[in-house]
Amino acid sequence: MKRRRPRRSGKPAEVARGEPPEGSRRSAAPQGKGQGRSRPLVAEDAGCLGPLLAAVALAAVVLRTIYLGADPPLDLSWSQALFTDGARAVDGARNKIMYGEWMADRISPVVLFYPISNGLAYLIYRLSGVGLVQANLTGVLPGLATMLLAYGFMRRRGRLAGLIALGFVAFPYAYVIYSRTPLLESLQVLLLVAAFFLLLRGGPGSLVASGLIVGCAAFMVKLHALHFAAVGLVFLFFAARAGHEAPARPGRSGLLFLAGLGIASVAWLAGVYSIDAAAVSKYFKSNVILAQSAEYTDIPLLTMVANRARNLFHVGSGVDMFFRKLPVLTSLAAFGLISALSGFARGNKSLRPWEMLSAIWFAVLLIALSLLSYRPLRYFIPLVPGMCLLATSFVLRLLRGEPLLHPHKPKWFAAAFFIWLTSLLIHIQHDVIFEVLGLGSGGAGAASHPSLLRYDLAIVPQILIMGGIAAAVVFLSGRRLREASWRFGPAARRNLAVAAVGGFIVLNLAKFADYCADRRYSIAETAESLDRVISPGAFVVGDCATTLSLETRFRTLPSYGEIIRRRDAETFERYPITHFLIRFPTLYEYLEETYPDFRMSCVPVGEYMLCGRVATVVRYEAWAGYPASYEPTGYEEGMTLLARGDAAAALRAFRSFLDEHPESYEAMFGVAICLSVSGDLNEARAILAEGIRIAPAGALSYHVYRDLLEALQGQEGAGR
């Protein structure tokens, strides 16, 4: 008998086929042969889902808000951005609140590049004041909103789907840490997730809105979001092939999506150009997605090609090892990816649109990121939502007893499986074997296997070996691979699901608990010290200065790095710089090279343990353009006099400062030094002991002056 074709309706594709929505009781009921194997392990109306949802939501909020003033973990990434770039992204809002102007730095008008984050920060600052915790809320709030979006979308596919999706988005350690800072990744992820759901909704208005949001994310948050334009276009193509979208007038949906993207880009370009025409070129020149010329300087062509090949296969490895930092999520996402790819056959509607888009998000974004030469960990954070949804798909199929591989696979599935398996094997080799042997971190084995770590053609044999193994697996599996569905019995499904979800949550909570137990507050403590000993009229330039300014009254110029790279001394002198925060040698070398008298004109203000490294603050006396508002404090005058050898006058300056600031352990240490120079060791020891008592235990000065106190006590013992 001829099958009757179902009538089209305006409902979503999955409902239009006459099937119940995902997560409904009718969809969960086993049908036909093998009922026992397909019965869902957890009913959609199970009473435990409500308490579990509340526990996951509460944990997600706590992870993102507890100890919000603490420094980020030092070992998360080699990139310094955790301590520097976030504050730059909201510096315009601070300037507006404190000084009445959005753009204090005309060399690099950052507020024009990041208007959305500055707008959010301005609202927070107006409500609760300027500070480090308030700035971090600009990452926390988008992170929480992302979880609400993910839960709300997946909740329509069932209570269980919403709970699992929320759990996967709530706990990834690296994503949690980045969403606790003012860095732009959290806001970028929120906008991309919103664009993701609008793409799935379809319809002209939603497609234009999706493109508009991607454009805003790219040009008003971070240019890397532009990669998502390719994700959207690839999804619309495959959705039309699978029948999820009306195939009439192909390309219309893509044009609507691109129209929204174009509207956002034109609006940003017109707005920025009208304010500062030069800022447009500065934005693109400073962005690593386009500016990679340094990689192609003085290297052979074959080496350059080998670098690209190595990056493509070792994406996420290298120094940060992104995938190794999220082992369970990476594994579940990898299996979810291959599960979704098996359903990309033409006309196959068993692959749900959100699974398709998640797979495309992960695969396309991964390839795009692989082509960048500069790839710190934060660039991979936008991969996390796609990974979470792929993991959700995999676990849901386990719990519902659905096949993990679709029975009708696309013709290119064998090739996709080969690439997937090759990449997986290379990552296992690099991230696991290298780690065990100590090669990845430059351990003892690195000397005996230098070719394994080089960015040249030595990677080719590794690719060939792993590719050969993958090809053998694909060839030997043959027909079995085409017919495989990867079904498991109830016990195996239950054990796999519990191990996957439980291991994921426990590992990430353990990492965060370890961070909480070893947290530091060096940024807050250093800012408090500088706010006490430096005049409010000071201009401080240097790495981390913008972050420190969140808890201080001094002003900063976050674009000093651009000046140094361009060797633009004339521009540098236009600003009334008074203090330099020396943390990396580039700034110090630049000042010595450009201003020969710099070394003679530097007066040390203090040394701090900042973000795991020693930071020295110096005052540059010879600067011609000191601002009229700047007047050195008594502490700075004492340090200046002490540097000139006038201990008696320095002692008077320090004591005068202590009268105004009796809690200043910095001035106590200065007094102690002056007393020890003049020979009054007993009083020096007493005031040193008091300064050590009130100084933060993690402060560099605490350790330095404790050693000095021990030396003085040793002198006393020798004298006896």
Image (cartoon, rainbow, N blue to C red):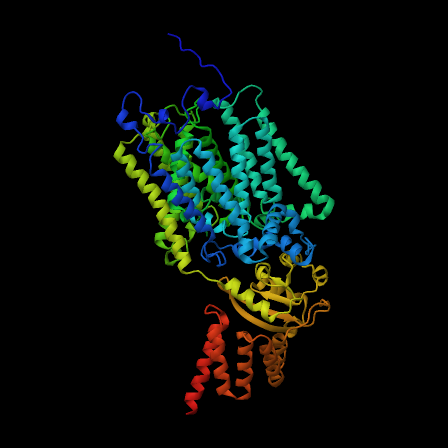
In the image, 705: left or right of 250? left
Tell me: residue 677, above or below residue 284: below
Quadrant occupied by the N terminus: top left
Q: Residue at x 70, y 69 (%)?
A: 623
Residue nearer the viewer, 696 or 488: 696
**Residue lying farthest bottom?**
720
Q: Residue at x 30, y 30 (%)?
A: 487
Residue nearer the viewer, 450 or 153: 153
Residue nearer the viewer, 564 or 418: 564
- Across and down, in percent, residue 622 comes to 69, 72
In which image quadrant can residue 651 be found? bottom right
In which image quadrant can residue 35 be found? top left
In the image, 500: left or right of 70? left
Residue nearer the viewer, 111 or 553: 553
The answer to whether one can see residue 583 in this image is: yes
- Across and down, in percent, residue 267 comes to 68, 38
In the image, 498: left or right of 683? left
